Amino acid sequence: MATIERLTDSCLLVTTDSDATLFDPGFHPFTSGDLDLGSIGDVSRVFITHEHGDHVSPDFVRWLIDRRSDLTIYSNDAVMSFLRKHDIEVTTSVPSGVSVEDVLHGRIPNGATPPNRAFTIDGVFTHPGDSREPTSTAPVLALPLLVPWDSATGAVEFARRLRPSQVVAIHDFYLSESGRGWIRGMVGDVLSADGIELVDIDWGASFTV
């Protein structure tokens, strides 16, 4: 059993019987005021998909470490190099019960395709970061909806290819609450015809699988 909570943007908290895993602690959940940081429970580990600021804020990571000194940060070589400059230790090892795919970020407007690590935990939940390249998913997939490197149509095609049972929206921090609801509704209607459920939760909400 796992509880999946949307914090904001691509930052999710996944709690299982053994771990509480925080994904992609970017600047938006830390600085926007849209998240009550005090509501974050006891996080046991952090997974970071890539080095962009909306997915990793050194200040947020340091704040998490200050709350729990034995916190382990997992990511790829690029994030390890980036956070080393802030005296934050990162491991590229893969913990038990977790699988990863090292893929490329979607091409951004300047042409770059940074390294991106997709994580799957306990065979339950997959966070692909900012990539449509992962080749497999757990039954629940975090699905980036509106991004500078792709479109909602690309999100639908990605979900159809991987065939999760459920998706939860991520990467929509620049939309209003009504805008987030509208895009979730549109994508959810399309995916439902393929037997894929979009779990319609907004920031601060959670569901259990």
Image (cartoon, helix red, strand yellow):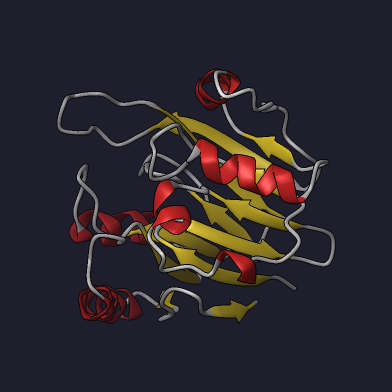
Q: Position of residue 98 (x, y in %)?
A: 71, 45
Most foreground residue, 74 or 36: 36
Q: Position of residue 200 (x, y in %)?
A: 40, 81
Q: Is residue 47 visible?
A: no
Count numbered badges in the picture: 0
Using the image, determine if residue 17 lies above or below residue 22: below
Using the image, determine if residue 164 lies above or below residue 31: below
Residue shown at 38%/45% (left/top)?
54
Residue shown at 27%/80% (left/top)?
181
Residue shown at 48%/68% (left/top)?
35
Considering every residue shown, the one lying at the far left of the view is 109
Most foreground residue, 33 or 29: 33
- In the rendered image, which quarter contains the C terminus? bottom right
Q: Position of residue 1 (x, y in %)?
A: 75, 73
Most foreground residue, 185 or 60: 60
Q: Quadrant of residue 39?
A: bottom right
Residue 43 lies left or right of residue 112; in this view the side is right
Residue shown at 27%/77% (left/top)?
177
Q: Position of residue 137 (x, y in %)?
A: 53, 53
Q: Is residue 109 visible?
A: yes
Q: Quadrant of residue 109?
A: top left
